[in-house]
Amino acid sequence: MSRIGVTARQIPQVDSRWHRWVGTLLLLLGLGLHVAPVSRAQDSAGSVLVVQIRDEIDLGLAPYLARVLEQAKREQASAVVLEIDTPGGRLDAALQMRDALLGSPVRTIAFVNRNAFSAGALLAIAANEVYMAPGAVIGAATPVTGTGEAADEKVISAVRTTFKSTAESRGRDPRIAEAMVDPSIEIEGLVNRGQLLTLTTTEAQAWGYADRVTADRHELLLAAGLVGAAIQETSPTPAENVVRFLTSPVIASLLISVGFLLIVADLLGGGIGIVTGAGLALLTIFFWGHMLAGLAGWEGVVLVLLGLVLLGLEAFVIPGFGVAGILGFVALVAGLFLSLTGGEIVTNEDLVRAGSTLGLAFLTILAGGGLLLWLLPRTTRFEGLVLQTRLRRPDDRPGVGRGNGRSTTPPPAGAAALEAPPASNEGASLVGARGVATSDLRPGGIARINGERTDVVSQGDYISTGEPIEVIGDEGYRRVVRRLEAGEGAVTRLSSERGS
């Protein structure tokens, strides 16, 4: 009885402690169950990076998008949203952006608000999901030339295949993507043969090319389950904006032409100095911009450097203009052309753009070269490269006329033969006179005629140092010479030695 009574009295105490422990555990468990899902949701919901694809798609957008996708991967972002409103743009830039989207592990959402034509359509198809605003359109992606005409069949086929493979990789009907490029494709109930496909928002949703219809970004985030995510607005960096500037045809041609002119001017001036460094810096800027844009590669750089080396050898080492000069010119043009047209698909527009850039560059080089030829004789640094002569009146020769401090009376014949120095070549006609080239004539150079150093120019042939020559033209300001044949050389060398 007492035992039972004791037990009865102890039960409330035990129950009270048990209830307190159980209640505390249940409270902690409830709090844990309530807090844990929120914590996991916040951890898994990373930021959302927004990329604006506005106006024309150019080469500056390709490195910009690649950088944002890499940032999203590094930061484990929840998604990258592409807000697209573009009439299209450069195909080479769109292909680079398409590859970046397909290769990114980050969730990508294309929000078409309002237009995704041409290259913009390819970007939308390459995204994981496509959301469209009411009244938006997507399609009309056939490649055209710079004049607005359709590209040739080869280019259309390549672009059509690119659209097809992109749609297949995202689980969309490839025939619809092809019809956006090629008007010869007919899809019953959607587009007739001869018409280029452009989808409205309603059509795109009905045919699987729009996952959702959302009026704005807020509705998009709500539909995509990203309401709680932090939004990061992105924009191109200054370097990416510079890429747009450097890849324009006018700026690219100026970088090429001015860079080469500076290098040539400095080399002709007798060496490599600050001017050559400035020229190389301009060429480096050209290649840097086109490498960032995904056009230029190291093969283009190597070809250009090889061309410069070969042209330098032709100009300063190997006489004349032969194999080295031709190969150097070809390598130079090929390297620049590759750097202007790099990409998976080269369209007629790309070829025309590259051709116009190079054409403008060479016209600038010709104009600058003419200016150099006009300036060289007026610059002391270049005086050794240009034929320099002075015109004197016949009575101004030493020993003749007035004002020279010498007697105007000719000396006796015997005295002249024994004491007078060799007759000066200045002002006197030297036609028929013979001498020896004392420098290479390329075609200008120096020769010894009548025992005096005389500036001469060949008819255009290369004449090596030591070869016998004869003056065949004397125009006062220049003496034109020719190379003597082997039989005539002995007489010339003997007369030259006597004169010296």
Image: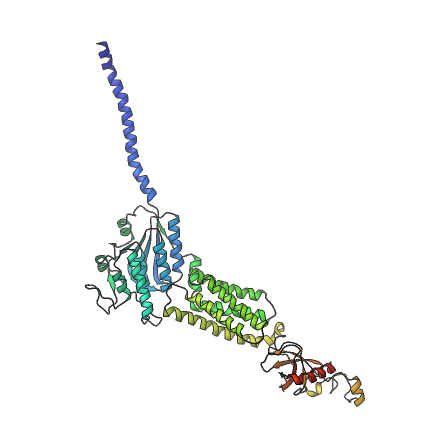
Please name whichever residue, 411 or 228, is drawn nearer the observer in this view of the structure: 411
Say which residue appears at 78% left-offset and 87% top-offset: 417
Q: How many marks are shown on the rendered structure? A: 0
Say which residue appears at 39% left-offset and 56% top-offset: 66
Say which residue appears at 40% left-offset and 58% top-offset: 63
Q: Establish if 71 lies above or below 461.
A: above
Q: Establish if 16 lies above or below 357.
A: above
Say left or right for 436 vs 329. right
Say left or right for 426 vs 443. right
* Residue 187, image quadrant: bottom left
**Residue 408 x/y as whole percent:** 76, 88
* Residue 401, image quadrant: bottom right
Which quarter of the rendering shows the N terminus? top left
Say left or right for 82 vs 429. left
Which quarter of the rendering shows the C terminus? bottom right
Task: Give the residue furthest to the front.
Answer: 487
Is residue 425 at least partly visible in the picture? no
Q: Establish if 280 lies above or below 130.
A: below
Please name whichever residue, 125 or 232, is drawn nearer the observer in this view of the structure: 125
**Residue 393 x/y as whole percent:** 68, 86
Is residue 20 at least partly visible in the picture? yes
**Residue 359 x/y as whole percent:** 45, 73
**Residue 113 x/y as whole percent:** 29, 58
